[in-house]
Amino acid sequence: MDKKKRAMIGVVVLSILILGYVGWKFYIARESPVVEASGTVEARTVELTAKVAGTIESLKVRAGEEVNKDDVIAEISRNDLLAQRERDALNVAIAQNQLNDLLSGARSQEIQEALALVNIQQVALEQSARDLERAQILFAEGSISKAELEGYEQKHIVALNQLQAAQAKFTLLQAGGREEQIKAAENQVKMMEAVLKATETVLADLKIVSPLTGTVLSTNYEVGEYVQAGASLATVADLRRVWINVYVPTDDLPYVKLGAKVQFTVSGLDKVFEGVVAEIASRGEFTPKTIQTKKERTNIVYKVRIEAANEEGFLKPGMPADVIIPKASLTAPSQEGEQQNTQPEQEAGSS
């Protein structure tokens, strides 16, 4: 019996110790002047990808180097696109010349040549008319046959047609291009210019530029390698300002205020950094599995964004960080200038 009593006493004592420890931890947590949380350092990061497939002609950066916005990071070679641009530019020039000819009308020399042809055909028609008149007299006298007369008549008709054609050409050259011809030529110029612009846009994509000022985190290819469109050539991050997303339990959220100054440490650096609460989520969520907190995992938590300056560059994306947020007071100034509790109270007379 003594052994059983001693065992029971031991169980009771152990239970009391466990409950006491849990109660002490709970009390310490409630009375702690700070909210503790953890997260990972993040920064604005971009992947510099190839928009056009081709061979890397030059790679101008290495990991760890600083770059400025719009700096050329790499260049891709595509000789076929260069040749296409030359062809497109030539087509634009041809179309523009054709339009200019229509707008300016025929050259003076062409008009003079057409007028000279009209004069020649006029003389030829007059000569054929005299020949036909003489042939008709000879036919009436019986000196030539019917067939010979018809030959002169046919020559006169041909001379008349040739004069009319020459006159029409001369009139057209004087008038210049017709409205529908000019419109068609203008459309042709616009179409050729659009084709050239499209080719030049693709050529511009052969230069890979950084959209931000930052640090090159990595490069993934070497000069001479062939890359497909969409391949990531380098990763650049703006490390001048970083942030940490932490998750705060519901019970601690009222103590966290926008603009509050916080402190945090990161693994591997014996230094305390300062930051500020920049954003507090308006909706709660279950604790992410990748986040460790001192609360139960089933608790609802709120994402809090901590931003920090990083001019010295000590902080790198991916570093684990432990954040300490000083608890803010739960009282706020009333409209009369007094302090009032921000927690909701039961209305008088309500049950």
Image (tube, rainbow, N blue to C red):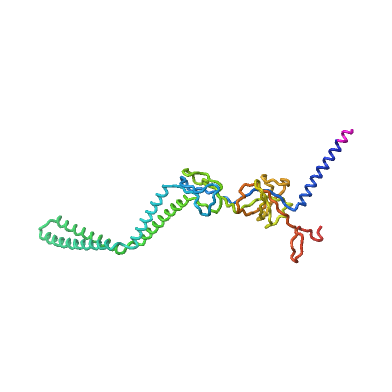
Q: How many marks?
A: 0
Percent position (x, y) of residue 339? 76, 62
Which image quadrant: the C terminus? bottom right
Percent position (x, y) of residue 330? 75, 57
Residue depicted at x 66% and y 48%:
270
Res 152 visible:
yes
Side of 214 relative to 342 (left or right) = left
Which image quadrant: the N terminus? top right
Q: Which residues are magenta?
A: 1-6
Q: Does residue 43 lie above or below 183 as drawn? A: above
Residue depicted at x 53% and y 44%:
220
Residue 3 is inside the magenta segment: yes
Q: Residue furthest right?
A: 1
Percent position (x, y) of residue 193? 41, 56
Side of 305 relative to 178 (left or right) = right
Side of 87 relative to 172 (left or right) = right
